Image (cartoon, coloured by chain):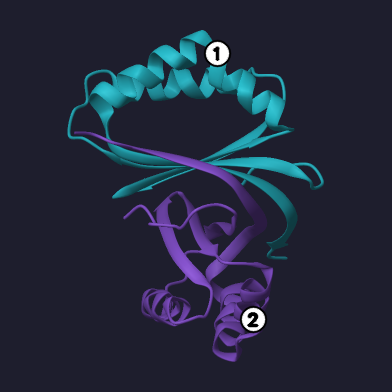
Chain colours: A purple, B cyan
């Protein structure tokens, strides 16, 4: 689903990744991460797709809520497993959404 | 591939879309769009994946280069076909990348 974000400004965290071939609990942890992030204060929505490369964009009210999510203990444990096992490489970009518009076919 | 963007700040255009079931030249035009965007002044890279939802993030030097790309004539023609045929809905978000970091497995 396209995330139903509020009026600008808000923040986007763009997480782009290349997976290793290791499964080792990845799918279950990905679902858990989705549940966990959805409960966070300031979380506005998420969009995700993998096709060779994985792109997950999460949306946030402000930098403070992004910081708190980064410091979340369970999140930090899952991140450590990600670095050790699931990801060959990734890039995180933190960006201020200044403008948005949408199209919906009638 | 993860886009090899320069030091912040730069801009991201996050294009999230739901396709119709209509093919009608979509794949060829998607390839053409990729060629065309790669030639634009100020273009820094692009990342794209579709898995139910499509997410394409293009990176740009500044707002001026994004504006010129939006006004590109061939791009505007393909966009019109996108609205008429290929997309059920989409959302475009223009965001200033303030910070980024990456991980590469050794």
Residue B27 in view here: yes
Q: Do the residues under discs 1 and 2 have CB atoms within 8 angstroms?
A: no
Residue sitting at 27 percent across and 28 percent down?
A: B86
Taking the view exactly as shown, the residue that stands out farthest to the top is: B73
Using a 10 Å C-alpha cutoff, classify the residue at mark 2 as few (fewer than 14 neighbours), some (14 to 19) or many (20 or more). few
Q: Is residue A5 above or below residue B29?
A: below
Q: Secondary structure at mark 2?
A: helix
Answer with left or right where residue B24 lies relative to residue B93. Answer: left
Tag 2 subunit: A
Q: Residue at x 55, y 66 (%)?
A: A60
Residue B8 drawn at (x, y percent): 79, 48
Q: CA distance from mark 1 to mark 2?
A: 41 Å
Relative image position of residue A23 (x, y in whole percent) = 42, 73
Q: Which quadrant would residue B62 be assigned to in this image?
A: top right
- The structure residue drawn at horizontal position 40% and vertical position 25%, both measured from the top left corner, is B30
* Occupied quadrant, residue A30: bottom left
Task: Specify few, some or many for label 1: CA neighbours under 10 Å numbering under 14, 14-19, or 20 or more.
Answer: some
Q: Nearer the viewer, residue B89 or B35?
A: B89
- Tell me residue B84's x, y (percent): 25, 22
Give the residue pinned by disc 1. Answer: B72
What residue sits 36% from the left and 80% below the top? A28
Q: Could you say which quadrant of the image residue B45 lies in?
A: top right
Quadrant the N terminus of chain A occupies: bottom left
Return the residue found at the far bottom: A73
Q: Secondary structure at mark 1?
A: loop
Mark 1 on the same chain as mark 2: no
Residue corresponding to mark 2: A68
**Where in the figure is residue B75, as x and y percent of width and height?**
48, 16
Q: Is residue B43 visible?
A: no
Q: Extreme front residue here?
A: A7
Chain letter of disc 1 in the image: B
Q: Quadrant of the C terminus of chain A?
A: top left
């Amino acid at each position: 689903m396209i995330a139903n974000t509020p009026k600008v400004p808000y923040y986007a965290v763009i997480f782009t990744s290349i997976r290793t071939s290791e499964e080792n609990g990845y799918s279950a942890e990905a679902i858990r991460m989705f549940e966990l992030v959805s409960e966070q204060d300031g979380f506005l929505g998420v969009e995700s797709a993998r096709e060779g490369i994985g792109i997950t964009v999460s949306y946030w009210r402000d930098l403070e809520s992004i910081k708190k999510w980064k410091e979340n203990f369970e999140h930090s444990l899952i991140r450590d497993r990600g670095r050790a096992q699931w990801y060959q490489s990734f890039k995180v970009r933190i960006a201020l959404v200044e403008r948005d518009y949408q199209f919906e076919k009638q």
